[in-house]
Image: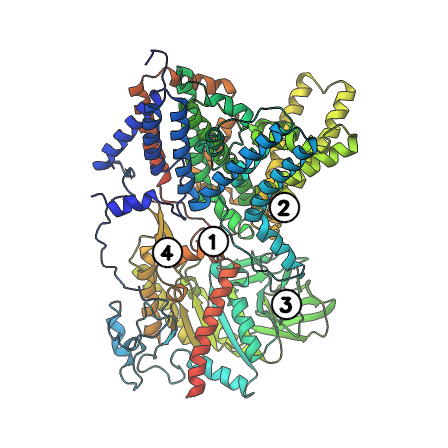
Amino acid sequence: MSGNNKSAYPFYIITGTLVCLVALSLIKNSFSINEFTTRPLDMLADVRKDAPSLPSEINDSTAYAGATQPGSIDTANGRNLDTAAIAAGTSIPDPDHLHNFTTYTGILNYHPPAGTDSTVTAGLEHFLVALDELKAKKRKKVRIAYFGDSMIEGDLITEDLRDSLQSIFGGQGVGFVPVTSVVAGFRTTITHTFSKDWKDYSYKQLPPSNVLLGISGHTFMPAGSSWIKYQPVKKRGLNKFEQVSVLYGPASAGNISINDKSYTLSGNQAVNKLSLRMDSARQVTIKWAGGTAAPLYGVSFEGDTGVYVDNFSFRGISGIELGKLSGRILHEMQTEHPYDLIVLHYGANVLWKPELTDYKWYGDPMKKVMDSLRNDIPNASFLVISTADKSYKKSGNYVTAPGVTALLKVQHDLAKMHGTAYWNLYAAMGGENSMIRWVQGDPVLANKDYTHFNRQGAAKVGALLYKAMMDEYMQLERQ
Amino acid sequence: MIDVNKLLEILLYQKDDPILFNSAFFFYFFAAFLLIYLAVGRSKEGRVAVFTIFSLYFFYKACGYYVGLVIISAIVDFNLSRWIYYTEDKRKQKSLLILSIILNLGLLFFFKYTDFFIGIVNDLKLANFQPLKLLLPIGISFYTFENLSYTIDVYRREIKPVDSFMDYLFFLSFFPKLMMGPIVRAADFIPQISQPYVLDKDDIGKGMYLIIAGLFKKVVISDFINQNFVQYIFDDPSKHTGLECLLGVYGYALIIYCDFSGYSDMALGIARWTGFKIPPNFDSPYQSSNITEFWRRWHISLSSWLRDYLYIPLGGNRKGKIRQYVNLLLTMLIGGFWHGASWNFIFWGAMHGGALAVDKVRLDWLKARGGGATGWVGTVMKVGGVIFTFHFVCFCWIFFKASTFQDAWALIHQVVYDFQPEVWLELYNGYTAVFWVMLLAFILHFLPGRMERYTEQGLSRLPVVASVVVMVVFIWLLVQVKSTQPMMPIYLQF
């Protein structure tokens, strides 16, 4: 080859580089400097024999089979022995003896601990009976308080659950809407605009001691020219306003106008209600008209009968924040605006470190929160919804975060300990690596953070939850 | 430790794992190719055969049996163009050309646009068809345009058709340009086939520079910014503040440029190392001070193709001013649609077409006035023009990238009505590395062209061993960036 023709150079460079890289791959080439560990380089990763896989902590390979597993008594190695005695004293078997909670896609109903007040019923019982009474016209309303984080922002999931329940059991209206909301523009179940001068106290910025935090985690104080405007949207059950209730705190002579008609807010309860009937009004505009400033919680839109689902989303929280709600608020809400089911749907913000598998830091304070919620709202059913699947990138590939199954167990134990219902959303989604299928599938059901559902995915979750609830309801009806 | 089954599996087409220049597989492929290519380097027929076989395998690896489409379209266009050339009858020539256009565009339409039109028909409730959900054959948009330009050039008697079918198949399947272009003209490429395989030190330096720069743009800038920040924003713009959305759009401007031009650079570099010079496809487009200039520097092979085979045949500027504006708009509308079967792309193309037409008016006015401002006013105008052009292009990218119009409007809404500049520190703490990479990318983009030439010259003077060291260190760095734990999105509090 002549001296000036370098046509062999590319081959030398590429092959030389390849040889060096393969040689590097054969030795351990990852090293640490201070706290930083370099990533290993492996040119053979795609063709290496798989390392024998470690037995996973909780085997959930059968998830999504959907079927109950009658033979699988005690196979759940994640069972919490502390609570094994809970079911003792009742003749009804512990649901964990019938189903493996790590894979079961339906709702599990746990019994309250022995010695609990008799008004506390097991799992969803109170709620299902209430639905049955509603259907038999023995009661007018059934109300659900659905607490969650950014997973339910903008009425995601609750929108679909509400729609399904209302289509069977009746109801007209979106339920509770706060005074202002960071996701008002994103919510498609009501058109909601507001002035910027409302003072928003919340879990993140607690109100002064003489003001209580509302059940949604927010309390709003009006300023000089504060206003809120709500308009119905063109969707079934959401296209008109019937009953509009303003929920507010202690007030003496605070003036507001609703669609230009003046009202005075007064009442010394922690929760007071001003209800109006709206006939054919195309919008509700509430303006602050001066007087002594009164704390406002929100506005509820309902009909005379039916099922109502109130969405209490609060971005970035783990559920422990609910401990900041006072017993007085919860008690008085139960008088003015009673709930039959309390849903607790958290997890996304607990899993902030994907490889963390010890959730004692979460379980312990959350237990206290649930103790007091159960105590302050004794006559309602509780449903704990587990974390959804969440994936993270591990050596180049997305996999279910190891924390997910660990957190599931903590959430299950909380449910079992308090005799609430439990729904394993992770299993219902399809178990291990289901989030990857939801993100990468057609249609796309979740966002690329491998954590949050998109609208379509949230609709699917709402439908799965509705189905799980209805399965329980059918069972009750059969009995 | 090597699993033979896995090895065999990797050699076959894998639907979810297309072959990319930045994959380990490509490295082995390229080394094996260079070895055999070099072995037959002295014979033209040998080189054509080896290159074509490797290219067809590359096609197969990327899109399975759709490789057949390339072969079929090569057979059809090779023969049709010869027929066109050697026929005396003008009418017959024209009919053959029309046949070729219908066949080529028909194939492209069938695979790329059928579902789009089924969607329109269904939406208008004219009928209810099931979408075909076809997998798009990789590269079809590129080789369709290459076939068309070749046949049209032959019809216009600008080039003589090739005599050897293998040469034509080689041109069409040439693997460096397969996935993301550039669109190569037969007139530029085919004469290079018969030249001996000789590389000088400039070829080595330039090729290596292009490969490294391309990998850097693709892996360090584009993929990194996208995976750790921008994809979260575009996934759900309404959940992010206006500031995040705006930074997300700036980030996307870098992603689309670095991804596309990085890939083009790698293609050019690989081609250069195998003895082929392909004209550059991008020329620091965000340095443009007006939209007309932008389109001279962005995806040059496509814009020049559209100019030569669409804009000029439509009449170009020869049929009066109004007609020229319409032609510009129409060309860009079709150019937008070429990018993908959705209204977003059409809208994106229309915005660019409209802007080009408006810019044409401005340029004509400047010409009538005898030139623009000079001195410091000129400099300020130019800087202002760069900033304005960049922001206009960014605005259009919103529609290009957003999956629906609602998402695009939601993003714009956030920027306009919910900007929340006070969250900047929290944002910075959440995505520190991303923002530094973005800043670095912008600085690199605005460096003068001579920096590039210095680097190329430096690389061309390296002995082989030093080149190997540079490559190994560079790839080790890429692996570090590629496999870092992704930054999880922060959902800003309030």
What kind of residue is marked 4? Leu
Q: CA distance from mark 2 to mark 1?
A: 24 Å
Q: Which residue is mark 4?
A: A351
Q: Chain of mark 4?
A: A
Give the total of numbered labels: 4
Q: CA distance from mark 2 to mark 4?
A: 33 Å
Of pointers 4 and 1, the one earlier in the residue sequence: 4
Q: CA distance from mark 4 to mark 3?
A: 35 Å
Q: Which residue is mark 3?
A: A235
Q: Secondary structure at mark 3?
A: loop
Task: Relative to A223, say whether B139 is above or below.
Answer: above
Mark 4 vs mark 3: same chain?
yes
Q: Secondary structure at mark 4?
A: loop
What kind of residue is marked 2? Val
Q: CA distance from mark 3 to mark 1?
A: 25 Å
Q: Which residue is mark 1?
A: A447
What kind of residue is marked 3? Lys
**Label drawn at residue B416:** 2
Q: As drawn, is A183 to the left or to the right of A121?
A: right
Mark 2 vs 3: CB contact within 8 A = no
x and y percent of residue A193 in the render? Answer: 64, 58
